[in-house]
Image: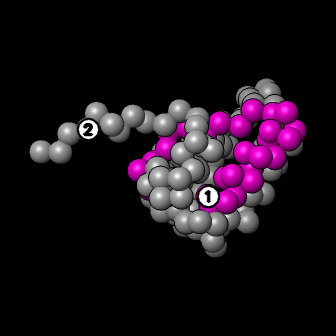
Amino acid sequence: MMHVDIEELNNFCIVEVKGGVTLSYASELKEVLLESIANHPDIEVRLHDINEIDTAAIQTLWLAKREARQANKTLRYVDHSPAVIELLQIYNLIEEFADPLPDNSNSEEG
């Protein structure tokens, strides 16, 4: 089940997405993101509490990024969870979501 918290600070908006973000919730996520884009010039979407994500959700995030660019607004995805990073890597979309990604390259397996 997806849950979204929104914090609005003047022209800045923080959207925190939590839980499972799947086809069942893609429409709701799209509505939240597009409304945030319409009402704020600067949006930060925090993804660290996403424990499940699918292709529909990735498409929704990509759509919102595109819509923000077309509206000359800033939309950043930050604090990517391991589930989000894994799916972005599978679909070779890391460059499309080139906002700050955690650096996992230094992790050592023991």
Task: Assess whether residue 97 is covered by the magenta stretch.
Answer: no
Q: For the C terminus, give its image quadrant.
A: top left
Relative image position of residue 25 (x, y in whole percent): 65, 67
Residue 110 visible in the current orientation = yes
Task: Assess whether residue 83 is covered by the magenta stretch.
Answer: yes
Q: Of label 2 and label 1, which has the lower sequence position?
A: 1
Count numbered badges in the picture: 2
Image position of 107 (left or right of 64) = left
* Amino acid type at mark 1: Ile
Q: Is residue 104 above or below residue 90?
A: above
Q: Residue at x 48, y 62 (%)?
A: 52
Dot 1: few (<14), some (14–19), or many (≥20) neighbours within 10 Å?
many
Q: Is residue 22 above or below residue 4?
A: below
Q: Is residue 108 above or below residue 49?
A: above
Q: Nearer the viewer, residue 96 or 100?
A: 96
Image position of 71 (left or right of 2) = right
Label 1 sits on residue: 58
Relative image position of residue 37 (x, y in whole percent): 81, 42
What kind of secondary structure does the magenta stretch mostly adopt?
helix
SS at circle 2: loop
Residue 84: which numbered mark, if any? none
Q: Quadrant of residue 6?
A: top right
Magenta residues (range):
57-84
Q: For the N terminus, give its image quadrant.
A: bottom right
Relative image position of residue 68 (x, y in whole percent): 79, 41
Residue 37 visible in the current orientation = no
Pick out the residue farthest to the top. 10
Q: Is residue 94 above or below residue 105?
A: below
Label 2 sits on residue: 107
